[in-house]
Image (cartoon, coloured by chain):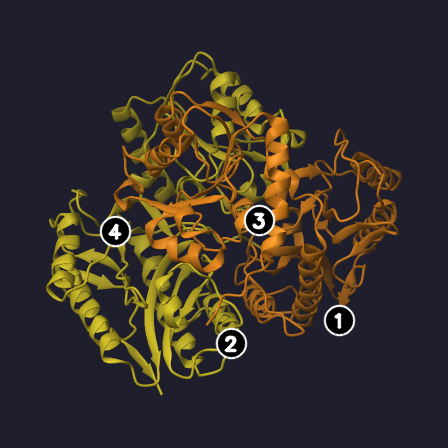
Chain colours: A yellow, B orange
Amino acid sequence: MKFEKPFPPEEFRRRIHDVKQRMERAGLDLLICQDPANMYWLTGFDGYSFYVPQVVLVHLQSDMPLWFGRFVDVNSAYITTDLPRENISSFSDHRLQHPELHPFDDLCELINSRGWGSDRIGVELNAHFYTARAHQHLVKGLPNAKFSDSRELVNWARLIKSDLELVYMREAGRLATHTMHTAIANLKPGVPQHEVVAEVYRAQTRGVGGKYGDSSGPPLIQTSEQTNAPHLSWTDEPLPTSGLVLMEFGATRRRYCAPLCRTVHIGKPPAEVSRLADVIVEGGDAVLGMAKPGTVVEELNAVWQDILKRNGYMKIGRSGYSIGLNFPPEWGERTVSIRPGDRTILQAGMCFHFQSGVRLQDFGAAISESFIVTESGGERLAEVDRRLIVVE
Amino acid sequence: MKFEKPFPPEEFRRRIHDVKQRMERAGLDLLICQDPANMYWLTGFDGYSFYVPQVVLVHLQSDMPLWFGRFVDVNSAYITTDLPRENISSFSDHRLQHPELHPFDDLCELINSRGWGSDRIGVELNAHFYTARAHQHLVKGLPNAKFSDSRELVNWARLIKSDLELVYMREAGRLATHTMHTAIANLKPGVPQHEVVAEVYRAQTRGVGGKYGDSSGPPLIQTSEQTNAPHLSWTDEPLPTSGLVLMEFGATRRRYCAPLCRTVHIGKPPAEVSRLADVIVEGGDAVLGMAKPGTVVEELNAVWQDILKRNGYMKIGRSGYSIGLNFPPEWGERTVSIRPGDRTILQAGMCFHFQSGVRLQDFGAAISESFIVTESGGERLAEVDRRLIVVE
């Protein structure tokens, strides 16, 4: 039995070359990556073990990255990466979740043993799981190092997807289509929310077209007036005989995720619901039309906000974000946000989730799209009708 | 439609009272909790939004905790908690995932506005999502505060489960039983791994006995020689016509999780596999027998290691950990570890996952149990046969 790696070695080499160039520009000798998506992107490491300290190290003078993690996860690194065995090392398990010790005490030793203890070291100060205590142990254990925040250096390197990555993004989009259609087919008055979610999980995982699905963050579903609270999970509440259902979930291929929201009305929708949905679709269409190389990100937001405003609505907060590779609980990349002030210039191959949710006082709606920036505008990853879906 | 809160107000009051006493002993005026499990335990807050900065504040002089998070998640706080509206506030969305700004800049303002800017403040330095950058913004924004690491203060307060919590733990255990039986029924030669996992997700979520399931971390499955890499996820590899299958997953009721591992052999197992499984069962039985109030945690590990050693095996790393409430990606509580040096004295109502995985060079096995400490020993939460399960 062989683990099928998601990318060939040359793809990882290209990424590491790119990251090293960014490190040089940022004045870094060594980069410590704890973000599980960055670890995967740099090496292919795909163990579900990121709730314990583990990192990938990239050093300007080292050909291949190093993996450092828990002893029990070393085999996952052997299996899922092409790293040479001497680049894979582990911490003593007694340091795990210990009141005084920390696995990074061993990481300091590893860094010193490589002669990198006085280097300029970039750390992911704002990565999930890179805790403040972890940072303290690192700073204390490497008193001669010059630490700085890498400021999502690898996340930014991930912004434009390669052709191989776009294959997974499109597969994820097809899986999102299939999963949303499955979900909608299960929306009937009286069916408990959790039964719909069970079918969503099943469809997400079984996949479509011979391509299975990986884990995404949990599916979200809200009904009726709770559609104004977008991050509630499911309960066993029966679906209303007449009312709104809002669903958001991702579909994931080899850790590449296409999220999608759709709003469904069971029974004849009130005029105010249909009207909001129509405006959301109009706004989304305008954004997709503009999503070409050269457009500035904040212009996407401006056109969307204008359409909302013209129709008497408003949305507080960003209207989308960069997507690609990630592990639960998040599918965003923590780089570009579609909002005022984001002056990122779109380039072909960037991917975004245009998160069109608008929450009014008593209800909310969202008809979102995950898309790729192309010369002809945003290429939708999923193909689910862009409208308020009415279930009779 | 009403959100059914997981606990009555008096349960939360009791918890907050307990935490305030611990804060006094630790010399803290204010505690900032970012761990999503701690936020839930203190207030019931149950939005799936912990991938953005959000916290619960407990102050000695304040009756009820405060919730601080993203604007779009305020409605989730209204719906899922009993906090008064004036205790719920949000940050400006433009600070989210911004290269220079941070939501905690607003948190500093909130703390100052309450007159707490010079207080002794405990923070969860090692909580997932409490990033090093978040900590820097807090320290910079509150120059007169005296910060210290709360050292999992709330996690430790969660160690002994209340009767109401044990109801959920036992329900989670029944769900784990149901889910494992479903999984085993799907293990047949040639069935791809992901199809088994799809049925696991479905069973976990549909629940059993009228009790639905919440999200757990993703199910893990390994086969053949990869059973020595415990945190690999699924692929579409067909199950072997003859060989090992190792599964680990949780089952979760209202965020209370009972994890479980079982090892299955398709076809007649080799003697070395049966032998390892028998020893694991013997060791687990010994641990469960000793899991009574008064036993010291490291003694559980010692009896287990002795049985392994006597049979020519060894296990590196801890053999279990405290469980209860948590959100993906983790189901442990990050407090007690069953290993040498952990001198925690067992008390009735503590819950553990005895993680019996033993990984040899070419294969691994695990037959684990989640249990409650009781006067008559460990009460198993799930009831799946404690043996190597052979599928013909």
Q: Quadrant for the C terminus of chain A, please.
A: bottom left
In the image, farthest residue toward the bottom:
A392
Q: Are marks 4 and 2 in contact (CB under 8 Å)?
A: no
Q: Amino acid at mark 3?
A: Trp
Of circles 1 and 3, which is in front?
Answer: 3
Is label 1 on the same chain as label 3? yes
* Residue wearing tag 3: B41
- Residue B302: x %, y % from top left: 83, 36
Between residue A152 and residue B126, name the one nearer to us: B126
Q: Residues within 10 Å of mark 2 (few under 14, many from 20)?
A: many
Indicate which disc, 4 or 2, sits on the residue closer to the N terminus: 2
- Residue A69: x %, y % from top left: 56, 35
* Residue wearing tag 1: B392
Q: Are marks 1 and 3 in contact (CB under 8 Å)?
A: no
Between residue A135 and residue A382, name the one nearer to us: A135
- Residue A72: x %, y % from top left: 64, 40
Q: CA distance from mark 4 to mark 2?
A: 32 Å
Q: Are marks 3 and 4 in contact (CB under 8 Å)?
A: no
The kind of secondary structure element at disc 4 is loop
**Image mark 3: chain:** B
* Residue wearing tag 4: A318
Q: CA distance from mark 3 to mark 2?
A: 26 Å
Q: Is residue A11 left or right of residue A336?
A: right
Rendered residue at 54%/72% (across/down): A236
* Residue wearing tag 2: A192
Up the image or down, A119 lies above or below B66; here it is: above
Q: Residues within 10 Å of mark 1 (few under 14, many from 20)?
A: few
